[in-house]
Image (cartoon, rainbow, N blue to C red):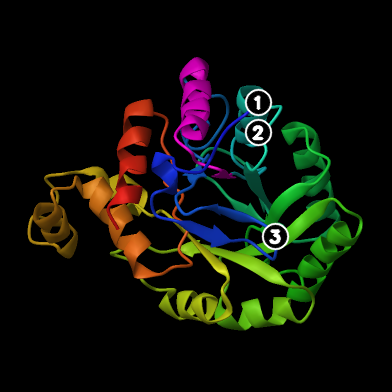
Amino acid sequence: MNQNFTDTPAGAAGTVALGDDLRVNRLGFGAMRIAGRGVWGEPKDRAAALRVLRRAVELGINFIDTADSYGPETSERLIAEALHPYPQGLVIATKGGLTRPGPDKWERDGRPEHLRAACEGSLLRLRLQRIDLYQLHAPDPKVPFEDSVGELVRLQQEGKIRYIGLSNVTVSELRRAQRLAPIVSVQNHYNIENRTHEEVLEQCERETIAFIPYFPLGAGRHAQDSAAPDSELARIARERGLTMTQAALAWLLARSPVMLPIPGTSSVAHLEENVAAAARP
């Protein structure tokens, strides 16, 4: 598959570095919501999910975020079905460290043996020889943090991971991980309403680490144009002639040059609305 990711709608907000030799457009796609209800099982409309993934690439998105726990396994399989063989320059990032006992249920498992099995399973489902960015989905309080990160380092040394990232971490945990290996990304909950991880973002800015805000649209709340008419988000939308969704994404893109939002959707129309925000930071 040939695809030009430069001069595309998704590239309008510029690029961000992932390590020394990867750059991606600063608006990505989060592939959690292409799975079934509760991030569980197959999507209600499989063909629509495949169309969304293909349209994302057509619009110039060259960073797709997923995890083995989305489905579980469903999201990774759909990505491979829709896009493999992958165009040059497309980065598929995935994560390990959460298990799924049922819909809308998540449990942490940072044991080295689990992370190894999760990574190797992702390689098979994504039809990759090496994962460009593999992120620890969440620290497991039952497992020493260094043991979890250390297993990712071993997988990296074996050539199964190109770069290591973290998710749901504090500044202290980021620094502990950096003693073991370079960390190129942090994926934490962050949006215009929830800035709990401001300190983590600021640390990422200082060290030019990509910051991937999950729930960039407040788990869908920011998609409601009639919501909170006196809010900061509503004011931005009115002043700039944007939808609430676009205003939320534009705010994130303007907030930091290391910001890499990954809004997810199961709708091509919503995808196109999201990508249009890349030109409006």
Give the CA distance from mark 3 to mark 1: 21 Å
Query: Where does residue 93 sit, x and y in percent of width and height?
Result: 64, 48
Judging by the rendered image, the residue that carries numbered circle 2 is 87
Relative horizontal placement of residue 91, taking residue 240 as reference (left or right): right
Say whether disc 3 or disc 2 marks the residue closer to the N-terminus: 3
- Give the magenta part as a residue range: 45-65
Q: Residue at x 48, y 22 (%)?
A: 51
Q: Which residue is mark 1?
A: 1
Secondary structure at numbered mark 2:
loop
* Mark pair 2, 1: CA separation: 5 Å
Residue type for callout 2: Pro
Of labels 3 and 1, earlier in sequence is 1
Label 1 is placed on what type of residue? Met
- Tell me whether the residue at label 3 lies in contact with that at label 1, contact meaning CB atoms closer than 8 angstroms: no
Q: Is residue 256 magenta?
A: no
User: Is there a contact, CB below 8 Å, between mark 2 and mark 1?
Assistant: yes
- Which structural element holds mark 3? loop
Q: Is residue 195 visible?
A: yes
Residue ID for mark 3: 21
- N-terminal of the pair, mark 2 or mark 1, is 1
- Given the current orientation, which residue lies at the most extreme right position? 158
Between 42 and 236, the residue placed more toward the observer is 236
Residue 236 percent coordinates (x, y): 16, 59
10 Å neighbourhood of mark 3: few (<14), some, or many (≥20)? few
